[in-house]
Image (tube, helix red, strand yellow):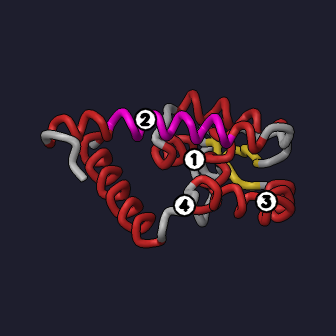
Amino acid sequence: MSTGTKEQDQKELFGMIFLLAHRWQYIGDQELKGSGVTTKQWFLLVTLHALFSNPPNLNELSLAMGSSRQNVKQLALNLEKRGFLEIYQDGDDKRVQRFKLSAKNQKFWDERAEKDERFLSSLFGDLPSPEIATTRSTVSSLLDFTDKMLK
């Protein structure tokens, strides 16, 4: 249901997505409180797990996360201190650092799996599957447009 002109709807949608991201980050941080992981760190771990079959370098990981190298490096260093990932030098080029998940990381998420599944479901409330699928498709298209803008 449209609230006005296309331009008004675009402005409102931009604000709503921005607000949703911030609220979900806050809610996620509350959910993870006491675990030693923030929502941003969680995103780094999920990115490593879901998008890379081989340990990426800092550039690859930063691009995948849509964040600066400095921010990703800081997140990774904190996760390394807590034992969730390993940062090591590339065997062929000592200037390149690679990032890989640790055994502790897998154990941590395995132990939280049920709780995390309930939490994720709670973020979507009673939205029916077709609405979730449509939203997923729309957000995917928006991410594609954004990727084109960044190139």
Which quadrant: the C terminus?
top left
Q: Secondary structure at mark 3?
A: helix
> How many residues crowd mark 3 within 10 Å: few (<14), some (14–19), many (20+)?
few
Contact flag, marks 3 and 2 (Cβ < 8 Å): no
Q: To which residue does mark 4 refer? A: 51
Residue stretch rendered in magenta on the structure? 14-28
Q: To which residue does mark 3 refer? A: 115
Q: Nearer the viewer, residue 82 or 20?
A: 20
Marked residue nearer the N-terminal end (1 or 4): 4
Q: Nearer the viewer, residue 94 or 34?
A: 34
Q: CA distance from mark 1 to mark 4?
A: 13 Å
Marked residue nearer the N-terminal end (3 or 2): 2
Q: CA distance from mark 1 to mark 3?
A: 31 Å
The spot of residue 53 in percent (x, y) is 60, 66
Viewer-nearest of labels 1 and 3? 3
The spot of residue 118 in percent (x, y) is 72, 61
Q: Which residue corresponds to the image point at 85% horizontal and 45% vertical from the top-left?
A: 83
